[in-house]
Amino acid sequence: MNILFWNLKDNNNADYIINLIKIHQVDIAIFCEYYGLNQDIIKKALPNFTFSTGMDGCEKVIFLFKASITNEVRRESNRYAMYSFEYDSINYTIVGLHLPDQRSADSDARKVVIGDLMRELVELEKETNNYNTIIIGDFNAGPFDSELTQKNMFNAVPFKDVIKKREIIEFQHKKYRRFYNPMVHYISEDTKQYGSIYHTGGSSTVVWYAYDQVIVRNPLVDNINNILYCKSIGNTELISKSGIPKGTISDHLPLIVELG
């Protein structure tokens, strides 16, 4: 199962999306900042895919499912949508999200959204007794930021051994189930997988940030075959000669997640 996430920066990247889906054999695609997207082009080119409108409660993300994948929206807010779906006779929960931007909000603003999301997700996991959970999107925070690591937030750890040894932890007399964050494993200078967005604002010397991420619950930690920030789509380079994402396409690179 292959999943695509892309922050489109309000550009009409329909042709690029079609090529990405074909090249990487994508089964589920999720987009944010998609307001400039001409969905009709995609519908015509990919008749075996269907956009999901959900309950019309999510303004920030939109899902595109392969028509053969049975899916149902379960929870929504303006910044995330939560779906149950079946793939190869296995039931999953997937959350697509776009958290408040670093330039206009602080970590506390993101934590408010995360708190609401996690309450609804835990409720759904208990309701369905299913922990095949995937969260993917623009977190606007890095793998080691408190939004990802704090126990009452995503509680995501970057190492398989940690979550396998202790999936649920207790803190202040409350129990919290962990997520696994595989992004650190795939960020590498050798493969030139630096991150998904480049910026030099502020006092930090970091220029590449891994804001677009995927995290999974314990049952799926060994199912991640590959994670890729796409720097090109066919013959089209997404990185300019100066080494940053081409803003005319998007300031974010597409994220491809391959699950076994």
Image (tube, grey):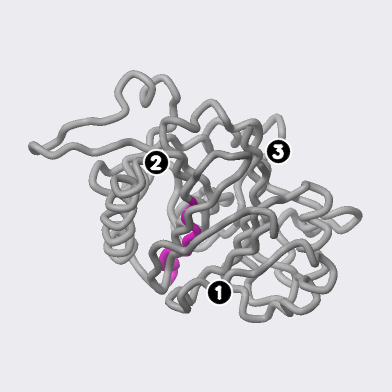
Residue 29 horizontal side relative to residue 97, left or right: right
| Residue numbers of the magenta segment | 94-103
Mark 2–mark 1 Cα distance, whole angstroms, equals 24 Å
In the image, what residue occupies the spot 38% across and 21% down?
164
Any mark on residue 131, and which? none
Q: How far across and how far down the image is residue 16, in percent?
A: 80, 64
Residue 236 counted in the magenta span: no
Q: Is residue 257 above or below residue 239?
A: above
Quarter of the image for the C terminus: give it: top right
Dot in front, 2 or 3: 2
Instruction: Indicate whether residue 100 is drawn in magenta.
Output: yes
Q: Measure how far apart labels 2 and 3 are at the Cα level.
A: 36 Å
Q: Give the residue number, with chain letter if any, for mark 3.
A: 192
Q: For the residue labelled by badge 2, is the local secondary structure a helix, a strand or a loop?
A: loop
Give the residue pinned by disc 1: 53
Mark toward the viewer: 1 or 3:
1
Residue drawn at (59%, 36%) of the image: 187
Badge 2 local density, few (<14 within 10 Å), some, or many (20+)?
A: some
- Give the tally of numbered discs: 3
Q: Earlier in the sequence, mark 2 or mark 3?
A: 2
Which amino acid type corresponds to the residue marked 3 in the rendered image? Lys
Residues at badges 2 and 3 in contact (C-beta under 8 Å)?
Answer: no
- Local packing at callout 3 (Cα closer than 10 Å; few below 14, some 14-19, many 20+) is few
Q: Which residue is mark 2?
A: 130
Where, by quadrant of the figure, is residue 33 drawn? Answer: bottom right
- As helix, strand or loop, the secondary structure at mark 3 comes to loop
Q: Residue furthest left?
A: 173
Q: Look at label 2 and name its amino acid.
A: Asn
